[in-house]
Image (cartoon, coloured by chain):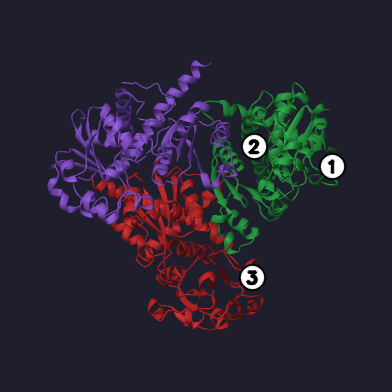
Chain colours: A purple, B red, C green
Amino acid sequence: MHKWNRKHLLSIEELSREEILTVLQTAESFKDISLRPIKKSPVLRGKTIVLLFYEPSTRTSNSFSLAAKRLSADVVNISVNASSVQKGESLIDTAKNIEALKIHTIIIRHSRAGAPMILARHIDASVINAGDGYHEHPTQALLDMFTIKQRKGFFEGLKVTIVGDILHSRVARSNIWGLSKLGAEVTVCGPPTMIPVDIEAMGAKVSYNLKEAVADADVVNLLRVQFERESGVLFPSVREYAAMFSMDDEMEKYLKEDALIMHPGPINRGVEISSRMADGKRSVILEQVTNGLAVRMAVLYLISGEKEKTRKSSL
Amino acid sequence: MHKWNRKHLLSIEELSREEILTVLQTAESFKDISLRPIKKSPVLRGKTIVLLFYEPSTRTSNSFSLAAKRLSADVVNISVNASSVQKGESLIDTAKNIEALKIHTIIIRHSRAGAPMILARHIDASVINAGDGYHEHPTQALLDMFTIKQRKGFFEGLKVTIVGDILHSRVARSNIWGLSKLGAEVTVCGPPTMIPVDIEAMGAKVSYNLKEAVADADVVNLLRVQFERESGVLFPSVREYAAMFSMDDEMEKYLKEDALIMHPGPINRGVEISSRMADGKRSVILEQVTNGLAVRMAVLYLISGEKEKTRKSSL
Amino acid sequence: MHKWNRKHLLSIEELSREEILTVLQTAESFKDISLRPIKKSPVLRGKTIVLLFYEPSTRTSNSFSLAAKRLSADVVNISVNASSVQKGESLIDTAKNIEALKIHTIIIRHSRAGAPMILARHIDASVINAGDGYHEHPTQALLDMFTIKQRKGFFEGLKVTIVGDILHSRVARSNIWGLSKLGAEVTVCGPPTMIPVDIEAMGAKVSYNLKEAVADADVVNLLRVQFERESGVLFPSVREYAAMFSMDDEMEKYLKEDALIMHPGPINRGVEISSRMADGKRSVILEQVTNGLAVRMAVLYLISGEKEKTRKSSL
């Protein structure tokens, strides 16, 4: 299968259908490792993985950190508050100084779209985008697709509905790119203020009515409401949002029997989803977390192989 | 000896005398490891231990973290300020998301009594209570008992006096449960406002006079004064507390020649204890720190064995 | 070669010429490890290295932490904000409690000059000074000397100019001690308010004119301007400082063709140095970062050997 020639993982947009499938296939073997009593593989022994997070995050950084440790890498955590970034150093200077420690991969989260690409252009280490502004969050989309693959087995013609603030969601953007490449049909659903005007150009259909949007969906992916910045601006209130776009108990009857309910977490119970639906038979929300680890191990592994090749050829 | 059938360590109250002795005996072998040049055992290789601390702590978290590393485990630190807990997620959702990373044990510290029990009921991973509200701090009591065993060799009829704010001390509660089970005679001593009314039901005697309380004590365990919340509420001032309940130089003549002085740390020199007494021949305060590591290695090891058994039998 | 009998690294002042050369020579082998695909040596396996930082730092702490991990040590990070130091515990009590965890080495950074020496007198573990007040920063000077050795090959008669706030620079002090011992000629250059009155007693020449000071320099080491505390006190403004002491494009014509430009980082582009000079052919600023890792691995290794010897002889 091995179709992987990339040193970086910057976006889903740039990946081919075959590259995406390679990640998903590789993730399967790594999922097995996570289910073994001794969850350890030596493939990154003696390599250093740096997490450079300019936005706070526990889930994504723990997931990457654990993925790296289970591959026997050394892990260095740099969060913006503790770092000399505060002393006014530029992103590139920071990265070049990290790279001078002879590290293997920088995993970056940044509030500015495009930051990972800038990094990749300026340093020799591998770069993984762990979320950049409203642009992309490629490993989240890969773990979503991996979860769908494990449950449904196929993508061609599969109907996936993404619900919420599509406009400000890097998760939505990465999912739309990926699912479209794999042949799934994506519908986005949310208040008109939260749907980008150019979304149909990305290959997605639009709906403003949740019942209609989920009626024949095989997968419903609910985005997280960002209370802190949205309430009162993009919609009148959380209550109003929930009344129209919540996957509440009421919604169950509109869903297909075997529909999957997904959410990137952390969930707001009673807002995007009711407790019964979050913990119900259709929910694969916790599976997504488990799969995130496998997908990130796969990405670290694939990139690492490519990196060594590049180095060898440059000798 | 092996008398251990528990997947969790939630309290001393629930442990039998034999179980306590099993931990203490196991800790002896692990203490040896800490004194070797290469302080490493492979027993938890490939397992992930998560520290989930909702209250700040350096000592306890470093001690657990180092115990886990010396057993070759991977360690993930989650402190509440950095975590998505702040985004309003419930304890159980947080724990279930951590567990989905296929981790082995969650070590939790929480300001709410009972939080570790709630966790243990809802997740499949092992849970260790690292202090819950005013309830219990089982590993602290185990390390206190281990220190007493190493120094005194026996518990039956041993007189132990615990001094300070008994009412708000999880350390005191865990010690009283444990020492009583092992046959020691516990006396608590402090200002009346700091002695719980039901303490005699737990098997402890009460004294309001330090000189009397330590006169025939084999062990004196001094609790830490929590300046930040107590001064002016439970006693008029730190000065007044110290005048009546401090183990100062003056007190030495009331102590038995071979009495042990213990303290869970960090000590307030000049408050609970004078410098001369803290650094004197009776003090085993730093030994407690060393023993804490051995006891926590023992607990992680015992729980791990039991966990594997549970899993095997559930196949 | 092996000329190393120290259990601690507290200052460059106390090191002999031979000891310095031993560190530099040892660092060469460790630099090789950092350039290998598997950057791992087992020499500190089963040992615990503690980073006790009372001042914030990313670079130095990452460099030490990675050095320790590449030598297979377990690493514990204690930063003052998260620690019980806040609860009013003294430096010595904190250190004794850390030592009771049976750790091997404490790497300390402290705002008070002399703190590492105090520690070394009171505990049995090895102590490494990672910067103490305005006193010394020995590993920074060692990495600077290592970089010079790799580029120039010799020290005898080499002209090194250090530019900036000499008065408040532990980097400058450590460099002056070290370079003088190795036979280099050191000139310091900066505004009169930033030059200590007794500097000539340390063996350095003084200049207040950058052009003159760099004219025949083989190495120019630019210190970082500490905006946060200096502007308006020691010099009228950053602008004025830069006008007189910046290594800007203009300065290039005054430099020797093969002069090295060094800086401990992070650099303030446009203040101490222009972007063209920072990224130019004379700059070895990023090499210094890479070399810092090798030098710190060497120091940890040398101290470790000596520590074991001490222990053996005390059995």
Name the chain letter of the residue that bears numbered label 3: B
Q: Are marks 2 and 1 in contact (CB under 8 Å)?
A: no
Alpha carbon of mark 3 to alpha carbon of mark 1: how far?
45 Å
Give the quadrant of residue A269: bottom left
Q: Are marks 3 and 2 in contact (CB under 8 Å)?
A: no
Asked if one can make out residue A72 in the rendered structure from this viewpoint, the answer is yes
Left or right of residue C62: residue A290? left
Residue C80 in percent (x, y) is at: 58, 55
Among the two numbered marks 2 and 1 on one chain, the one whose residue lies closer to the N terminus = 1
Which amino acid is tagged 1?
Answer: Met
Q: Mark 1 falls on what kind of element?
A: helix
Check disc 2 and report the residue beneath it: C267
Residue A223 in percent (x, y) is at: 29, 44
Name the chain letter of the residue that bears numbered label 1: C
Give the quadrant of residue B227: bottom right
Q: Are marks 3 and 1 in contact (CB under 8 Å)?
A: no
Residue A175 in percent (x, y) is at: 30, 35
Residue C76 in percent (x, y) is at: 54, 48
Q: Mark 2 falls on what kind of element?
A: loop
Check disc 1 and report the residue beneath it: C202
* Residue at x 87%, y 43% (from the top left corner): C201
Alpha carbon of mark 3 to alpha carbon of mark 2: how far?
50 Å
Which amino acid is tagged 2?
Answer: Ile
Looking at the image, is mark 3 or mark 2 nearer the viewer? 2
Which amino acid is tagged 3?
Answer: Met
Check disc 3 and report the residue beneath it: B277
Alpha carbon of mark 2 to alpha carbon of mark 1: how far?
27 Å
Looking at the image, is mark 2 or mark 1 nearer the viewer? 2
Left or right of residue C263: residue A160? left
**Of the pair A212 and B58, the residue shown nearer to us:** A212
- Kindly identify which numbered label has been placed on residue A92: none
